[in-house]
Each structure stands twice: as structure tokens, then as C-alpha cells.
Image (tube, helix red, strand yellow):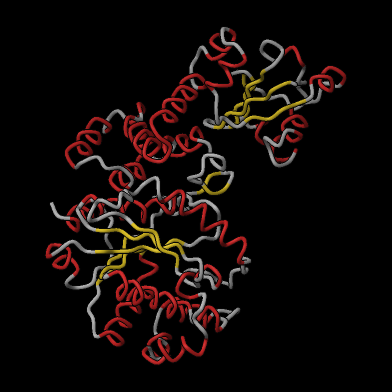
Amino acid sequence: MNLIEELSWRGMIQDIMPGTEEQLLKEMTTAYIGFDPTADSLHIGSLVPILLLVHLQKAGHKPIALVGGATGMVGDPTGKSEERSMLSEEVLQLNVAGVRKQLEQFLDFDASRPNAAEMANNYDWFKDFSFLHFIRDAGRHITVNYMMAKDSVKKRLESENGMSFTEFTYQLIQGYDFYYLYTNKNCKLQMGGSDQWGNIVTGTELIRRKAAGEAFAFTCPLIKKADGTKFGKSEKGNIWLDDTKTSPYEFYQFWLNTSDADAESYIKIFTFLNKDEINQILAEHKGNEQQRKLQKRLAEEVTAFVHGKENLAKAIQATNLLFSKDTLQIIATLTKDELDATLTGVPAVEVNKEQLSDNNPDIVSFLADTAIFASKGEARKMVQGGGVSVNKQKVTDVSAKVALHLFINGKYLFVQKGKTNFYLVKAI
């Protein structure tokens, strides 16, 4: 199965330029994907482009991960309703360094390999590129009519906020990236999300007009949840690849709690399991959905890929403990160090032991003061609805007191919010 066939059955190709598959079959091809350094970590929305590069390298081709140190200063208008706030050069460089470090853990950069991965930063070729030079060297090859025909531009021009000239030039700048990599790295293919199609083909057009060359492209669908809500978000916000922003436990829980419909598509996209393995998992899952075998395998594969097998083992250990019927009995047998090691990454909050002794707060105040809930109103509503448990016991009385004697060994209190959110409260 060639690369395009592999990605197609996984549901990872939406648009593809004619001749792309033939180019990949003809020779080892250099291809790139751009990553926007708007933060110092990528999130799981970036996993699809990362996986595209990994599949590309596994198929014998050469991947380039382009970090947009220059384009990050402009901001991609695609899919945005208003202009993004500008980041300083200093912040951008810190973000670029963080993103670069993450990408290096997924791709093979061994220079002895003919298809060794490379990193690139478009700031390197744009930093000394004057505005006059750019409009003479690149701008004259792409017409305003061509640029305005793009959907991303049309939507913004028709919106209330309009579009600044800075954002309007974005597709030309991204197009020049492709041209630069084509002429300097023999890069003939660009990949990206389906919302990037307009920007990508501007690059192929610039290569055709300016270099009389031929370049190729394909995009993957934007990942969405089956219920239409946005992929990659939890109640706390983005699911990050950086384990200091999203712990391996929380990361594992995100995948474990996906719906059946989502898990069926995600296991094809986000894992390297082959077709036979996936079909077997789906067959075992059907009719036994309550066992969540599909979600467990998905969570295991993705967590191991991003955080390693050791962190996966810890995430599973914490999950098994928290969701066990014997949680409290097991905890009573563990030392503080053992418990801390087992529950690494489980959301934890601290409360002052003396304050608890002096003033036993009601459950609603306690939940709000510890920030387990954003407000007393939200906490009260959840308690009254039976959605809060303390040490595995459901609490429905909003006036119930939280006293020190409830803490296991005088140190730990387990609060469950809904079906899947656990918090470890430590008395200090």
C-alpha cells in the first residue's frame, strides 16, 4: 500500500492535486508542513500534521517541519473572524523553540539517513527581505484577482471587521515559503489541513510562474467531533502535547472519554495500527460497547506515542485506582510518596489544614474556593443534581460540611465531578 492509499483508508486525505500520487511513487520526495508558533507548545490539533509527516517518512520520503517564525508575526486569517493580536519577536522565538523541541521527538533527524527529517524557520529567509524586494520578487507573479478569489479572503472581506493588508498578504508569504523550499531544498510537496488549500495552491502557482516548476499538494480533513463540537478541547481548554500543560493522565483521559462514533474514526487517524488490527478492535467493540475496548486501545496508542510507555503506565495506574470500587481501601495502604507517584498528573488542589479545623466550610463554598468549580452557583447546581461525590460517596445536601475527619489519613480527599473528572485535595 503506497502513502496515498494508506492515508486515504485512514480518512486523512480531502483535496489532492493531480499528479501528487504519481510524484510520490516516482522518487523520494521532500514535503513540508507549516506549524504556527502561537504558543510554546503544540496541542492535539497539531497531531494530524505531525502524523502526516511521520507517515511520509515511514514511506521513505523526506519531511520538513516548517515553524513559522515570520508568518507567526502576521497571523493566518484562514477560519478567523477577526485579526489576531500580534506577538512580540521575543515571545515568538520562545514559542518557536518550544515547538521545535516537540517536533524533534516524533521525527527521525538522523543525518545519516537519506530521508532525514529537517526543521526550518521561515524567519531565516524573511528577516532580511525588504518590503520592496518582496513585492518585486514575489508580488508581481500573483494577481490581486487570484488572491481575492480565495474563500478565506472572501469571507473576511464580507465580514463586519474586514481584513487588514497585513492579513491579506499572508497567502503570498506562505506561497513564498513553498517557493523558497522548492528552490533551496528541492521540496515538491506541501501538506496541511483542508482550510489551508487556498494558501497551499498559491505556493504551487508561484512556483509555476516564477520558477517554471511543478509542485504538488494534498490536504487532510479538519478533525471534528461527531456531535459537531470542536475537537481538541476539554473543560480546561486545549489538550496540549506539553506534559506540564496537560498531564499524561489528563491526556489519556481525553482519549478514553471519546464517544464510540469519534473513537471509530480517531483510531484510524491517530494511531499506526494497521487495517486488520483496527477492524478486529472494532469487531470486538461492537456489541460490547460498555467495556470501552476501543477507547482504551485508542488512549493507549496515542498516549504512548506522545508521552512514552512509562507515562502511559502511570496514567493507566492512576485511572485504575480512581475508578476502582476499592479506591479508598487501596489508598489507605499507600504511603504519601506511593500515592503521589501513582496519581501523578491527576488534578490536585491544596487546602490549609488549620483553616479546615477552625471553620468547616459547606460543600458549595469548598468546591468554589478550591476552584474545582468556577463559581458557587455552578457548584450548587451540580451538587443538587447529584453530580458530586466526596470519597466515592454522592453528596446532594448543599449545606453538608467538609471537615478534616473526612480526609483519608488526615491528608487526602477525593472529589469526583461528573462521571470522569477526579480531583485530589491535599490538606497541608
Front one among 24 and 418 = 24
Which residue sits at x=49%, y=22%?
Answer: 323
Residue 59: x percent and y percent?
20, 52
Front one among 11 and 62 = 62
Front one among 191 and 268 = 191
Which residue sits at x=36%, y=35%?
Answer: 295
Name the residue furthest front.
112
Residue 90: x percent and y percent?
62, 62
Above-or-below relation of 259 to 390: below
Above-or-below relation of 276 to 45: above
Name the residue furthest right.
358
Q: How many marks?
A: 0
Which residue sits at x=39%, y=78%?
Answer: 176
Which residue sits at x=54%, y=40%?
Answer: 246
Residue 364: x percent and y percent?
75, 31
Above-or-below relation of 365 to 262: above
Residue 134: x percent and y percent?
46, 86
